[in-house]
Amino acid sequence: MAVDLGRTGSTLSGLDQLELAERGKSGTFAGRFWAGTWPKVLAVAITLAVWQAVVWSGWKPEWVLPGPIEVFGVLADWIPTGEFWEAVATTLRRSLVGFGAATVIGFAVGIAVARSRVLRAGIGSMITALQTMPSIAWFPLAMILFGITESAIFFVIVLGAAPSIANGVLAGVDYVPPLLLRAGRNIGARGLTLYRYVIAPASLPAIVAGLKQGWAFAWRSLMAGEILVIIAERGALGTRLELLRGLNDAGGMLATMIVILIVGLLADAAFGAADRAVRIRWGIIDR
Amino acid sequence: MTAVLTGSTTQSAERPSGRSAVVLSDVSKVFGRGASAIHALDRVSLEVAPGEFVCLVGASGCGKSTLLSLVAGLDEPTAGEITVKGEGNPALMFQDPALFPWLTVAGNVGLPLRLRRVPRPRRQERVAELLRTVHLEEFGRKRPHQLSGGMRQRVALARTLGLDSPVLLMDEPFGALDAMTRDLLHDELERIWQERALTVIFVTHNVREAARLGDRIVLMSSRPGRIVWEHLVDVPRPRRIDSSEVAAIAAEVTDRLRSEVRRHGR
């Protein structure tokens, strides 16, 4: 054997080092955090300034459109009260239960449609059609079917969110690169093993995107539901909004809306972070 | 142990070619039906001896890749029989490394072992050994997208070797690499083939690569895919891709290949 093994090996590792030399990360954590944060802080500051300017302009009387200082004062008064936190807890519980049910149903439908040609032809396009139906349009039917109950709200949340989740699962399974399937089968993954080790992980980015979109639909459906389906003995964020409108309490309404906005933003940020983490790990996007 | 992939369950020991690592007898593959049917392979017969390195060369559409898919058991022949030595599937490598992006390098290499339920401590030893074989022992914790194209292809080779198949099928594995990396990987593949006494069927459209690597070059015609010419490469190893002997053989194969392609012109 005259091929110099050691030499080939060290030439290869020299090439490897050259190839990888330029692929470093730049910037400290604090630096990157600040770069992502200051535009958001500035945007909030500008929003508050415009709001205050409109109030000062006298366009509407202050009992109709109070300024940010008054609204945040109302919020500060609420924070120590149990009633406020009970409403937040009720809304969060409903959103989690509704979204959870939508996830289970969305996965079941998505996998069934992905696997069966008949189901795909039959209901594949109906899933998208369902998505275009504004969720508030379901409430009259839901209220006749279930009465003024939480079931009516859950019914609409599931109808709003499950199609997005099913579509995410379906897209994920459909777009698994055929080459990965061939490679998986060649190294010994067949049937259920192929699902577990290749199809499921390959679909994850699309599934997370579907869940994120499903959550957005669920949250909108829930707010519509809480405003329409008022269950008297139980306070909830949407319900408070409707009751405060009845009392002409604009400050309270705006404070409630800010809470709804913050919950929505936090949930969205969590889904966004999960989505990003998956994409970075899969090498779909760079850091 | 002989796996009969298709047709009857004939014991390969009773067949005249029972000692070969891979036997294709009158294998045909037709895609589609009727007038629009495509005859990808037409009565192809090929015997590959254990430890032999066979290079399949042909213009596009000659069914080289189809042939490998059939031998790998990823597809069924329309007619004929394929016998492959060894348990399970022969290992198959593609032009694209086809690594799983959600697994680390070590995870990719270890997956075939995991699927065979090799216990974890043994698996870690094997993964380390396989990564050493392809000179990537430091990169086990990286993810595929953090590596260069040549490195990914070496990970794919290590993963393929983890199948412990005596037969290695390669479908233009170095087609997408730069010349320098390709030359180095030729040396590496030759070394691994010799160390592990593998039987290799290597598909390429690069005749120089075929002359550099093969014990035998098999030329296929296009539409329908048939074996039209064979050549034993009697250049002693180690060879260099830029040596005059390799170049002379490559020139001869190129001439044959061109005259094959001309048949399809007007």
Image (tube, rainbow, N blue to C red):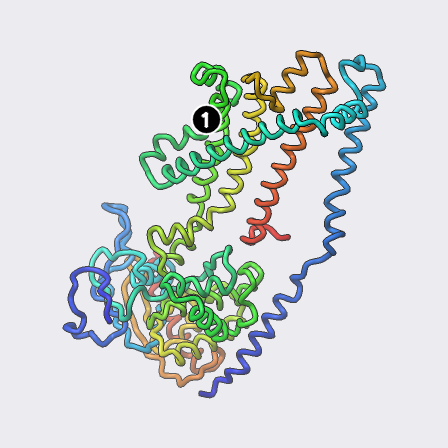
Task: Say left or right for B179 vs B172.
Answer: right
Q: Which amino acid, mark 1?
A: Leu
Q: Give the number of marks.
A: 1
Please state the horizontal and vertical placement of residue A265, each as a whole percent of the image: 65, 35
If the image is split into quadrants, where does the N terminus of chain A sit? bottom left
Judge whether residue B57 can be spotted in this image.
no
Please state the horizontal and vertical placement of residue A172, each as a whole percent of the image: 46, 44
| Residue at 58%, 52% in the rendered image | A280
Where is residue A12, by image quadrant?
bottom right
Judge whether residue A128 can be spotted in this image.
yes
In front: A245, or B210? A245
Residue at mark 1: A130
Where is residue B207, by image quadrant?
bottom left
| Residue at 35%, 60% in the rendered image | A188
In front: B182, or A66? A66
| Residue at 40%, 77% in the rendered image | B193
Q: Chain of mark 1?
A: A
Q: Residue furthest right?
A: A56
